[in-house]
Amino acid sequence: MPDSYTELWSSHRIALLKKARQEGARLEVLFGGPHSSMPSHKRYGVKAGDYIYPVQVDKGVLYILGRMRVKEILTLEEYVDRHPEMHEGVKKHPGYADLILSRYIERNPEKSYLAPSCTDEAVIGEDGTPIKLGIAVPGDVLERLEYRSQRGVRKPKVKDGKLQNWMSVWGIYRLTQASAGEVDALQTSQLDGATSATA
């Protein structure tokens, strides 16, 4: 059975997303790296078939930004080697992949939110939803939210329907099956509602 993970996007990353007017862009690839601002998915145990839900926290409210199913996880070198259109004459040398990605993003600033810091892996997705801002997790669902790890199950501290500390969801964390079901139902119903409203 696939696992589901939330991945917290920083306020800086959300600002880049808004500046580039990328709400509505479909989730097709996510990047990971060595720093806590954009951690490695592999290190958190993400594998092919799992689901990733990028999330945002603002004033104690948890927002779901979308959903992407993981098709495969590549090194950054493997990713750029598959995309020769990114190269533009940059020769292979130590660190070439990071340089290629940086230059590609400089030429395509609308993609800057995808890799706002150091990167060494690419998570290739399928069945990605459009990014949507404003899907808030209701207080009662937040009260029931649970994450699981090898050490057991933990619940972020919630008071009056709001997270007491955004650091409790900072990183990439695996949801329990029950919480994954609630998060998915909420995200799917909001997208369905948006589709119906524009039909």
Image (cartoon, rainbow, N blue to C red):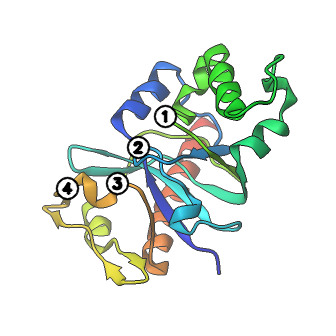
Which residue ends up furthest to the left in the rendered image?
Answer: 160
153 vs 192: above or below: below
The residue positioned 61% from the left and 16% from the top of the image is 106
Give residue 165's mark: 4
Q: Earlier in the sequence, mark 3 or mark 2?
A: 2
Helix, strand or loop at mark 4? loop
Q: At label 4, which amino acid type do we have?
A: Asn
Instruction: Tell me which amino acid carries mark 1.
Output: Ser
Disc sitting over residue 197 in the figure: none
Q: Are marks 1 and 2 in contact (CB under 8 Å)?
A: yes
Mark 1 = which residue? Answer: 117
The label number, if any, that marks residue 170 in the structure image = 3
Quarter the C terminus occupies: top right
Question: Nearer the observer, disc 3 or disc 2?
Answer: 2
Q: What is the x, y in percent for residue 18?
A: 45, 25
Q: CA distance from mark 3 to mark 4?
A: 9 Å
Residue 169 position, x and y percent, is: 33, 58
